[in-house]
Image: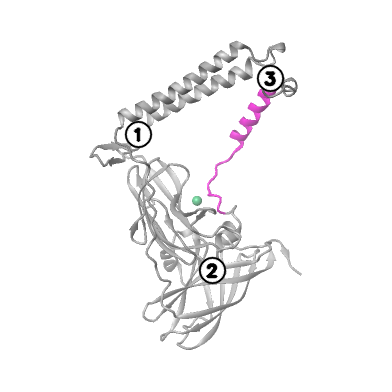
Amino acid sequence: MARRLGTILMALALLVVGGASHVFAHGEAGDQPFLKNMTTAFYDVSITPTEVEVGQPVTVTGTVKVLETWPRTLEEPSIASLVPVVPGPVFVLKDRVINDQTSVGSFFVEKGGIYQFKLVLLGKEPGNWHVHPGLAMSGTGTLVGPGEWVTVKKGAKPFEFPVTLLNGQTIELSTYGGQFAWWWSFIGFLLGMVWMIYWTFTKRTVTNLAVTAQLAVNDDAPDIGLITPRDHMWMNIIAGVTVALLIIGWTYAATSYPVRWPQQTDWITPRPISSGPHLAEVSTNGATYDEATDTFTMKVQVKNVGDSALTLNRVVIGMATFVPGGEAEQAKAGPKEFVGSLAVEPKDAIEPGATKDLTLTISSMIFSTARLIPLKDPQQFAASLLRFENAQGAQQLVTVRSSVVPTQFRGQFLP
Ligand SMILES: [Cu+2]
């Protein structure tokens, strides 16, 4: 019976391992649309270079704004960390700067906050990796920005990451203490395995659950030979070895590393960044989304409250940026897969004091590949970040929250 169960489990495990195809995305499409468009907006993201050798740096820069439309169903933003989202430990994070301040650990965030980041990663494992910046928000999870494929090639030298300690000693961080940590954990694992095998294979604890379940908790059941004095002896030996291991570990740590310091928590409050001078007042008159053609259309009314002509140069929705203008303009706006074109109608600039109704039309595959717009949600809203620019080059970011009515589902017209 036990053997048959084992065979079935093994077959299932093989099926799961062998049947899995390669996974390329980071699950961003799996997240609900509101988790992307209502929480954050990533823009001006650049990931360069896209081809390095092992040990060479890749720099990720950009800006993320924690939107004022942060959903009330999520925990309030309080603390976060800007992280590289990559498939496993294939890079090493060497440097991290938030709003021009070095950020070793996390930083305090607030709704409406703007965070300019710079991450320096070193290629560690050769391969072709998708690299994103992500905002790991305490209580919510990691909100992912736009990504880029980066190829890490084998270099002439093996990977090195030397770090100088406070006492002046230089260690190789990528291997430091690795052997010891592995073997020490393995000893603990072995001990656990001995205990488990002892009770599972030689005793009727698990295999005869029907019997053992009827015994009182502290009943050794000597009449059926369940737990014998010999078992007690062996368990005392295992417990003794565990205590001995702990004592050896503590003594070893205390004598080999006399100078110890608790792991440091270094949280910063980034200096505030303004969303720009007050140039525009924006209200929305609703949006529609046509799933069959991946077209998002939003109507906005813009009043120019500044003193020079105003144009709209960006619409940022979650991790995607939409730009009026051709491919040259789009290439500057971020990783290619996450940039699309934006049509603004009417095109001309808004004169000072004037109020204009604009229709913003975006047709882009990104909407369905990244699943940015809600289609069948109880709250049909989408937030977007509009960036206006005046004649002097001053820019203002305006967060807009609009209702979204789906006009056509893929392969199905609404009446
Ligand atoms: Cu990715």
Q: Front-most of 381 and 297?
A: 381
Magenta stretch?
Answer: 1-28
**SS at circle 2:** strand
Q: Which amino acid, mark 1?
A: Thr
Q: Amino acid at mark 3?
A: Asp
Q: Which mark is residue 175?
A: 1
Where 170 falls versus 245 (above or below)?
Answer: below
Cα gap from disc 1 to disc 3, whole angstroms: 49 Å
Which quadrant of the view contains residue 102? bottom left
Which element type, helix, strand or loop, lies under badge 1? loop
Q: Secondary structure at mark 3?
A: loop
Which one is closest to the eye, mark 1 or mark 3? 3
Relative to 247, does residue 16 appear above or below in the rendering?
A: below
* Mark 3 CB within 8 Å of ligand 1: no
> For the residues carrying marks 3 and 2, which lies nearer the camera in this image?
3
**Residue 154: which quarter of the image?**
top left
* Secondary structure mostly taken by the magenta-highlighted segment of the chain: helix
Residue 219, numbered label: 3
Sequence-wise, the earlier of marks 2 and 1 is 1
Q: Are marks 3 and 2 in contact (CB under 8 Å)?
A: no
Disc 1 residue crowd, few under 14, some 14–19, many 20+, Cα 10 Å: few
Q: Nearer the viewer, residue 161 or 322?
A: 161
Q: Which mark is residue 273?
A: none
Amino acid type at image mark 2: Ser
Residue 384 is marked as: 2
Q: Nearer the viewer, residue 197 or 359?
A: 197
> Disc 3 versus disc 2: distance between alpha carbons?
65 Å
> On the rendered structure, is 319 left or right of 91?
right
Queried whether the magenta region covers residue 7, the answer comes back as: yes
- The earlier-in-sequence mark between 3 and 2 is 3
Q: Horizontal and vertical percent for residue 43?
A: 45, 64
